[in-house]
Image: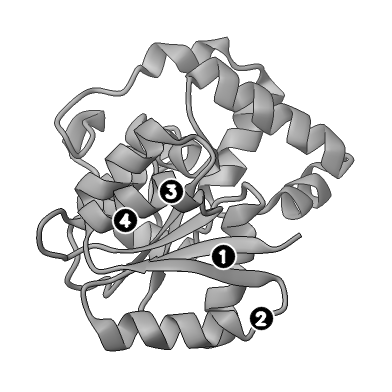
């Protein structure tokens, strides 16, 4: 299956560079380029990409606002944030808005392509070491989220003991295969647990599940 990708960045050279690198992959097709969030919204509606490769800082409509609108308007499209971590305070809020993960702009071409495949498959792109820094930096005290709202902690009580275990391991950056190995069960069983966790907590994907786990203090950053 070919993965349709929309590249969104206000710098033409960056857009063209990513398009060339990704276009060389046999399973990835560049379906369009956008210079700002407003153009991205129009192209998402027109071309229905599988993955939107989204910059954060752009004129007209920034990547955070665009991510919110894309996720709200199209459950099909998944947003992969591109950032320079040390400068972008908006990444955490983008994850809460529904982005499926993030990559640093200086990531190797192979990592970028693999990241797109991971996100297109419905997985969360959360490198554990970077995620710890991200959550530790941007999670508010006393379980408050980036917008000041308290996440619905009571919903955790709806999870079974095994589902809670799975949620913790998702937040620590483990894939379904890694979770299955750790809990000594089939990968299909883990997929079922993940689906139930998302449904019970009212979350869109694994990324939001990981953020939820940190915000409710089910998992705390270490290291």
Whether residue 66 is visible to the viewer of this picture, yes or no, is yes
Kindly identify which numbered label has been placed on residue 25.
Answer: 2
Kindly identify which numbered label has been placed on residue 46.
Answer: 3
Asked whether 93 or 22 is in front, the reply is 22
Residue 142 x %, y %: 21, 30
What residue is rendered at 57% in x and 26% in y?
A: 198
Q: CA distance from mark 3 to mark 1?
A: 20 Å
What residue is rendered at 31% in x and 23% in y?
A: 151
Give the quadrant of the C terminus.
Answer: bottom left
Considering the numbered disc 1 on the image, is that residue within a helix, a strand or a loop? helix
Above or below, 160 relative to 29: above
Q: CA distance from mark 4 to mark 3?
A: 10 Å
Above or below, 88 relative to 193: below
Residue 176 x %, y %: 73, 48
Residue with the mark numbered 4? 40
Q: Which one is earlier in the sequence, the residue at label 4 or at label 3?
A: 4
Q: CA distance from mark 4 to mark 1?
A: 17 Å
What residue is rendered at 32% in x and 62% in y?
A: 133
């Amino acid at each position: 299956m070919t993965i349709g990708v929309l590249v969104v960045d206000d710098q033409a050279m960056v857009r063209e560079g990513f398009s060339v690198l990704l276009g060389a992959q046999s399973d990835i097709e560049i379906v369009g380029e956008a210079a700002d969030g407003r153009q991205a919204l129009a192209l998402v509606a027109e071309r229905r990409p599988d993955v939107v490769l989204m910059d954060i800082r752009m004129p007209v409509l920034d990547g955070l606002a665009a991510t919110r609108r894309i996720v709200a308007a199209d459950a099909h499209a998944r947003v992969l944030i591109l950032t320079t971590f040390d400068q972008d305070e908006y990444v955490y809020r983008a994850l809460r808005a529904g982005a499926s993960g993030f990559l640093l702009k200086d990531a190797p071409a192979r990592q970028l392509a693999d990241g797109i495949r991971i996100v297109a498959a419905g997985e969360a792109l959360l490198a554990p070491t970077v995620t710890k820094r991200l959550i530790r930096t941007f999670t508010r005290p006393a379980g408050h989220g980036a917008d000041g709202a308290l996440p619905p902690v009571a919903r955790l009580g709806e999870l079974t003991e095994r589902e809670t275990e799975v949620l913790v391991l998702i937040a620590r950056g483990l894939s379904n295969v890694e979770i299955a190995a750790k809990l000594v069960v089939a990968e299909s069983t883990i997929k079922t647990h993940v689906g139930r966790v998302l449904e019970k907590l009212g979350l869109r994907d694994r990324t939001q599940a990981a953020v939820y786990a940190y915000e409710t203090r089910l998992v705390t950053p270490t290291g």
